[in-house]
Amino acid sequence: MRRHATPRAAGWTPRRPFVTLPGRRRGISERLLVAILVLPLLVGIAGPPTARGDELSDAVARQKSLAARVKHQREQVAKLRSLQGGLAQEISSTRTALAGINANLDETKTRITRIAKQIVEVRAVYGDLVAQVALLDRQVIATEEERAAKAEELRQRKALLAARLREAYRTGRTPLVQTILASGTFTDLLEDVGSYLEFGDQDVALAGRIEADARTLDALRGLLIDTRSARQELRSETLVQKRQLDAGLAELRAARARLVELQAATARELAVQRAAYARMARNSGALRDAIARNVAAQKKLASQIASLVARERSLGNIPSEYNGTLAWPLSATITQEFGCTGFPWEPQIGSCSHFHEGIDLAAPMSTPIRAAGAGVVVFAGPNPFDPYPKAWIVIIAHSESLQTWYAHIDNGDNPPAVSAGDQVVGGQVIAYIGMTGRSTGPHLHWGVVFNGDFVNPRFFV
């Protein structure tokens, strides 16, 4: 029997027509069924919007922050590489100096102190990078947990959706089930299901939140990948730098040990010399007179040598300039460097109360002494101007302006191996270690005269 339409109140607006399901017309019970199926899914799991902030924006911001941190870390790594490079050069120079002949112990000590300071700086930068690796480790764990929690949340939502869809299918709502399953996103779902049920603004917002959660999960996945990559890059680099730092520390320990050995050897030689000096210094007035006489004798000899060099130059036996470098005359323990000294038996020169005009090389008696370079022997024998005991000396002219002096050489069992006028080559044996003259022990006093003045021999080797 046909029912008559019920009169509607004035101003009534017709609702959107329902989609007709095959074989029947949807009624209010069907709309309630869909509401029962879908709304608890959205509200029960996603929940109403909370005040915890935009998780997607937060994840994106964290990716940007990580990128900035990685850039800073790479800058720190570059700084560490530069520091390690400088440290390696300093260590190499120090190792070469210690392994070479007659290391300058004061200079080497300064080098080692400088290396120690550089290592402190390297360790500070390295320690900061190690701390950043540990921080990245913690962030990887935290991001993994966060991502797992978000994935579990979406998994539960999908599981509940599947359960409700199965219930809908069981009750014969096949077209509705097919619609829901065919929907690409929850927003599409709401639009498609809108044919069956009207949803409010809150439901649409919840669907948007679910989509945002899915995008957040993708962002977290990207953040996790980037964090792991940054951690691996930094960890690999810190391992490389750790090996270099360990090598530097080992070299520093070796250099310090070698310096201690050389200092001990020097101290032993100095102890012998100081004991000898103590005996000489019992009569301070006589010692002052002896020093003054030695200075006067050296000046007279230097004047005579200048005349001899001029004559050899005029004969064409020596060049006007020396092309090349000098070599150490022997490997020995250096007991005195060139310049101001604390040894009171050296004369006063300029502003220095005691000044040493050469380098003292202590070695056992009769150790061979070699020419520092090619030249002409202009003097070989005892200094004629010395008071007793006279020092025996060999002097070689390498050019018109460059000479090398070899003093306190032996005159007993091993007299000088050359005579005045002999041409010598670099490395040729010219004399032997002795202790002639006013000497506190067997050693060679090696001096270099350039343009008439004694200068530091280290400038020429």
Image (spheres, helix red, strand yellow):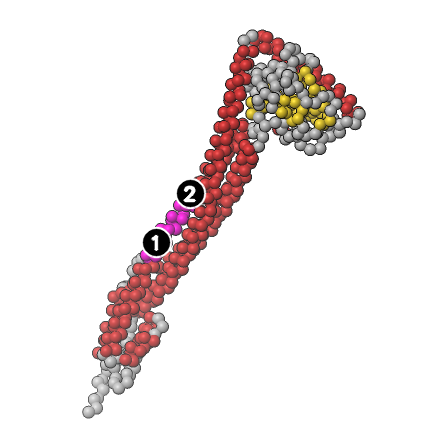
Q: Is residue 139 above or below residue 330?
A: below
Q: Depth check: give the residue in front, 418 or 277.
A: 418
Instruction: Write the residue at 25% across / 69% down.
Output: 40
Q: Residues within 10 Å of mark 2 (few under 14, many from 20)?
A: some
Q: Is residue 49 above or below residue 290?
A: below
Q: Secondary structure at mark 2?
A: helix
Please identify the residue farthest to the bottom as the structure is shown.
1
Using the rendered view, name the quadrant where residue 94 is placed: top right
Quarter of the rendering occupied by the N terminus: bottom left
**Residue corresponding to mark 2:** 127
Residue 212 visible in the picture: no
Q: Depth check: give the residue in front, 203 or 452.
A: 452
Please identify the residue farthest to the right as the structure is shown.
315
Give, as a three-letter code, the residue at label 1. Answer: Ile
User: Can you give x and y, in whole percent of width and height, for residue 41 in the image?
Assistant: 26, 69
Is 138 part of what is drawn in magenta? yes
Instruction: Write the residue at 51% across / 39% down.
Output: 87
**Residue corresponding to mark 1:** 141
**Horizontal arrangement in the rendering, residue 44 relative to residue 83 (left or right):** left
User: Can you give x and y, in whole percent of width and height, for residue 48 in the image?
Assistant: 28, 63
Using the rendered view, name the quadrant where residue 177 is placed: bottom left
Q: Depth check: give the residue in front, 236 or 272.
A: 272
**Horizontal arrangement in the rendering, residue 108 relative to residue 144 (left or right):** right
Alpha carbons under labels 2 and 1: distance apart: 22 Å
User: Can you give x and y, in whole percent of width and height, for residue 451 in the image?
Assistant: 70, 25
Q: Are marks 2 and 1 in contact (CB under 8 Å)?
A: no
Give the magenta range: 127-146
Give, as a three-letter code, the residue at label 2. Answer: Gly
Residue 106 visible in the picture: yes
Q: Residues within 10 Å of mark 1 (few under 14, many from 20)?
A: few
User: Can you give x and y, in whole percent of width and height, for residue 22 in the image?
Assistant: 28, 85
